[in-house]
Image (spheres, rainbow, N blue to C red):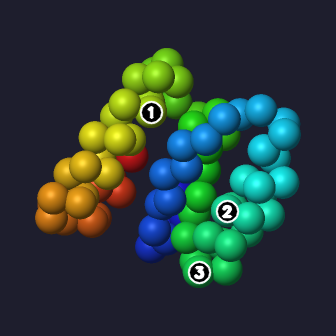
Amino acid sequence: MIQDSVFVFVLMPFDSDFDDVYRLGIKERAKSFDMLAERVDEQICREGILDRIYRQIDVVRRHCRGHDRKESQRVL
């Protein structure tokens, strides 16, 4: 992740029908706000995709409940 950028958790189908929506409508728009948007299939991780999705959902929940943003980014 780019230092000091906000991470945007993107949960959507990996289907190629959605590539333009993701790349142009989400990823590029997030970048224009100095945010890093990634689908889980772009991330390098040792855990399975579903485990990664569940963990990122948990991080979002914790963040929404008021936990520190830097802590949330570190967990990702």
Q: What secondary structure is marked by label 3?
A: loop
Which residue is found at the position 58% from the left and 77% from the top?
Answer: 34
Which residue is found at the position 27% from the left and 65% from the top?
Answer: 69
* CA separation in Å, label 2 and label 3: 11 Å
Which residue is found at the position 71% from the left and 34% from the top?
Answer: 14
In the current view of this chain or complex, which residue is farthest to the front?
A: 17
Indicate the position of residue 63 as horizontal and vertical percent values. 24, 58
Q: Which mark is residue 33?
A: 3
Indicate the position of residue 29 as horizontal and vertical percent values. 68, 73
Q: Residues within 10 Å of mark 3 (few under 14, many from 20)?
A: few
Q: Which residue is mark 1?
A: 53
> What's under tag 2, amino acid-wise?
Ile
> What's under tag 1, amino acid-wise?
Ile
Q: Can you tell which quarter of the image residue 55 is in?
A: top left
Between discs 1 and 3, the one toward the N terminus? 3
Indicate the position of residue 30 as horizontal and vertical percent values. 62, 70
Q: Is 33 placed above or below 42 here? A: below
Q: Which mark is residue 26?
A: 2
State the residue in front, 16 or 43. 16
Which residue is found at the position 81% from the left and 47% from the top?
Answer: 19
Q: Residues within 10 Å of mark 2 (few under 14, many from 20)?
A: some
* CA separation in Å, label 2 and label 1: 18 Å
Between discs 2 and 1, the one toward the N terminus? 2
Q: What secondary structure is marked by label 1?
A: helix
Q: Is 61 placed above or below 25 here? A: above
State the residue in front, 69 or 9. 9
Between discs 2 and 3, the one toward the N terminus? 2
Q: What secondary structure is marked by label 2?
A: helix
Q: Which mark is residue 11?
A: none
Relative to 39, 18 lies left or right: right
Indicate the position of residue 23 as horizontal and vertical percent values. 77, 57
